[in-house]
Image (cartoon, coloured by chain):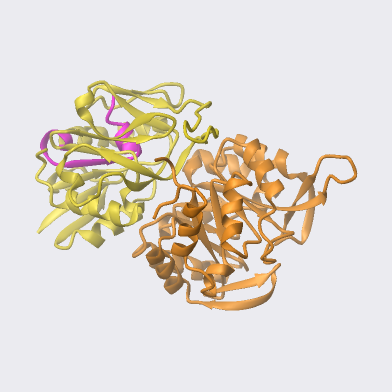
Amino acid sequence: MSLAKRIIPCLDVDGGRVVKGVQFVDIRDAGDPVEVARRYDTEGADELTFLDITASHEQRDTMVHVVEQVAGEVFIPLTVGGGIREPADIRRMLNAGADKVAINTAAVFNPEFVRDAAERFGSQCIVVAIDAKQVDDGTGGGAPCWEIFTHGGRKPTGIDTIEWARKMVDYGAGEILLTSMDRDGTKNGFDLALTRAVCEAVDVPVIASGGVGTLDHLADGVLEGKADAVLAASIFHFAEYTIAEAKQHMAARGIEVRL
Amino acid sequence: MSSIAIIDYGMGNLHSIAKAVEHVAGNTRVLVSSVAADILSADRVVFPGVGGIGHCMDELARTGLDEVVREAAASKPVLGICLGMQALLEHSEENTGTRCLGLLPGQVRRFASDLVDPASGDRLKVPHMGWNQVHRKPHPLWQDIPQDSRFYFVHSYYADPADPAHRAATTEYGGDFCCALARENLFAVQFHPEKSQHAGLQLLKNFAAWSGEA
């Protein structure tokens, strides 16, 4: 009897369609975002995340429209990310019906943006998205280390992930969306060492992302990675599993979920 | 045709609440308004709010809507949501101490930073974010909602009413806290019914039909 661990399907949106690529290449079409959102809501998703993967200005209008439509009929929390660069972007998404926005690249280039956004809109709606890649696996004797990357995992920043996560929470982030760039799209499971390191470093909830290929991966993210929520895309998009199956599996492994 | 006014004082996402109420309240006019006369002429009033309580109280005072909330609370069914629940009490620990509306006796307190889940021994995060169970007492607004249903929460502060009779429900997070308040025509919840799928929509539906009697 306590707080449930959340399952969050992620909809990567490009040109008004849900797509999913493997490590940001080899894009496959997975349907109309409003229809997909409706299906996940019916299956019992705890929350939905929409990521605008192109984040161009023309796409922004499409995304606002998608959020408006979904918010009119799906009554669970909605997060929108991709190209959130200034307060006006946040205002627009919240007005469209989003509950939270995910800030990624803009936070790296201007950390004060996170502080300003949290003060203006409240920490409860500011998610900082972190894309991390392992740069030292710890086998050489040092501690394992992960570095922040931007631009869909293409550009290194030299920033340490754990320090960055702590800093973003100090600046007002209400939640961390943590993606392993090494695992994203691989279906090999979350980077559990990374997930656990970040979860133990911060007081706010952490969503694990990147690499889910089986239902056990979701459960491992919670049990071993200590994540508060788990995010996945392709295993749900292509009907390999339903959200309900995922929840039943997690419950069978002793995890508290909303059934 | 009955009407529900959602008070707009610049704090938070009213779109979601309006959409959810429209979705369930069939033959009801739903208006989002900052105009005192419009709010006070509605049959029922929703008092929402997200963000910090200091800014919330400042905005209520600046717009004069604090008096509108008081008048509505004295005369018709009112539903407080999230910060709109906390603002009904006397005082909050947030923003180095904030005086609230004082419509119900009690305090708003922050979750301790060292909360632990008694079952697993895991450290509990603050904010309390996600779907948690609501253990309710009898009240018309819980009609057709199963005991211990899950609702969506996101908050770091919680209501601690002075009078136990005002507790309409509790939730466990490192101990029980009061997640719903009720007194006569006033009802208030810490969670977000507009984001709590079936259970939340049922609560809003019950509110849209509520006479204001407990």
Tell me if residue B76 is in the magenta stretch.
yes
Q: Where's residue B178, x and y in %?
A: 31, 31
Q: Residue furthest right?
A: A140
Provide the residue span drawn in magenta: B72-90
User: Residue placed at 46% from the left, 43% from the top?
Assistant: B129
Would residue A36 be seen by someone viewing this image from the given angle? yes
Q: Which chain is orange?
A: A
Quadrant in the rendering for residue B186 = top left
User: Residue placed at 41% from the left, 70% from the top?
Assistant: A39
Question: In front: B3, or B80?
Answer: B80
Question: In front: A141, or B82?
Answer: A141
Quadrant in the rendering for residue B109 = top left
On-image quarter of the N terminus of chain B? bottom left
Tell me if residue A42 is in the magenta stretch.
no
On-image quarter of the C terminus of chain B? top left
Q: Which chain is yellow?
A: B
User: Residue placed at 57% from the left, 56% from the top?
Assistant: A218
Question: In front: B126, or B67?
Answer: B126
Would residue B59 be seen by someone viewing this image from the given angle? no
